Amino acid sequence: MNTRWNMAFFLFFGLIGAIMLICTVISNVREEKRPIPALIASACALTAFMIICLGLNNPLKILTVLSTPQKGFSGAIIMQVVMIAAGMLIFIKSKAENKAIPIAAFVISILSVYALSKQYMITVRPALNTYILTIIFLALVFQTAWYMYPVTKKRAVYTALGLNIFYGVFLLIFTLRMKIIAPPDHVLDFMNVTFGALAPVYWGAVLCTFIMPLACTIMALRGKTIPKSLNVVSIAGLFSLCLLINQMPIIARGINNRIFMDY
């Protein structure tokens, strides 16, 4: 594997921040006042922002990046700044029972996920250059956030089941699409992802984000309790997915000191 670790962690903390903001919406629907998820969302967004700043040779270059919001990478970073402010504001104002707070949290989290996926929509990465990736991220964010709270009532269990199936269907579409796209993605190739060097990461993500949550949800329909450890498993699967998406071609030194991509 040739992982872009800074981008993998940037994506991971960005998605965790979105999950925590969705948690504020869910807690409001269930008539619980838990402002802590908003604070965690702000901390995750700040971590994601700092990862990018520290990864630049000159941290002042972040101003140049922020000055071009129309670009995917710039938009993703700008949304982390928005998430920092939104998380803190929601944390402070949550006790005021303002009905606009869950709406704002919902909208900002969706925009953040969209911006995080948009940065991968480039022609040189055909496997990622699709809104299917956006849908996968959104489905996984909502699914993970839903499991952060006790899923006991029948209505909540059926909602979880719907999220499981919706996520699984689009993950399958995303996987099969790798096999038919032209030109092919030289990194996220179907055989490499499902049976090659990236298979452990891919199947780990599938197991932790789809198979295990689906199995636990089906058990909940039969009266079983969903284990709290599923949250940790889902987050581990989310990280595996971030690793998979942030794979880069291997750079090898070729003839006469010329650099070639080794696919």
Image (spheres, rainbow, N blue to C red):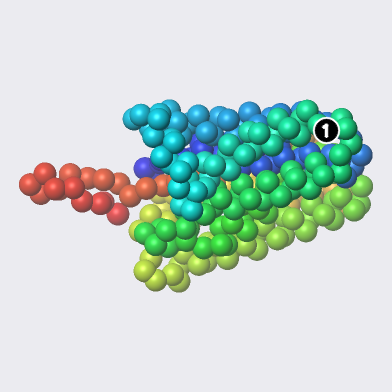
Of 17 and 1, nearer the camera is: 17
Q: Which residue is mark 1?
A: 94
The residue that appears at 41% across and 47% down in the rendered structure is 247
Q: Classify mark 1: residues with Cα within 10 Å, few (<14), some (14-19) or many (20+).
A: many
The residue that appears at 80% across and 41% down in the rendered structure is 101
The residue that appears at 18% across and 47% down in the rendered structure is 259
Figure quadrant of residue 96: top right
What amino acid is found at the position of numbered circle 1 in the picture? Ser
The residue that appears at 34% across and 30% down in the rendered structure is 57
Say above or below: 33 vs 169: above
Figure quadrant of residue 180: bottom left
Q: Secondary structure at mark 1?
A: helix
Q: Is residue 189 visible?
A: no
Say above or below: 45 vs 71: above
Q: Is residue 34 visible?
A: yes
Image location of residue 172, percent across then percent down? 59, 62
Image location of residue 173, percent across then percent down? 58, 65
Image location of residue 7, percent across then percent down? 46, 40
Of 161 and 100, nearer the camera is: 100
Image location of residue 155, percent across then percent down? 90, 53
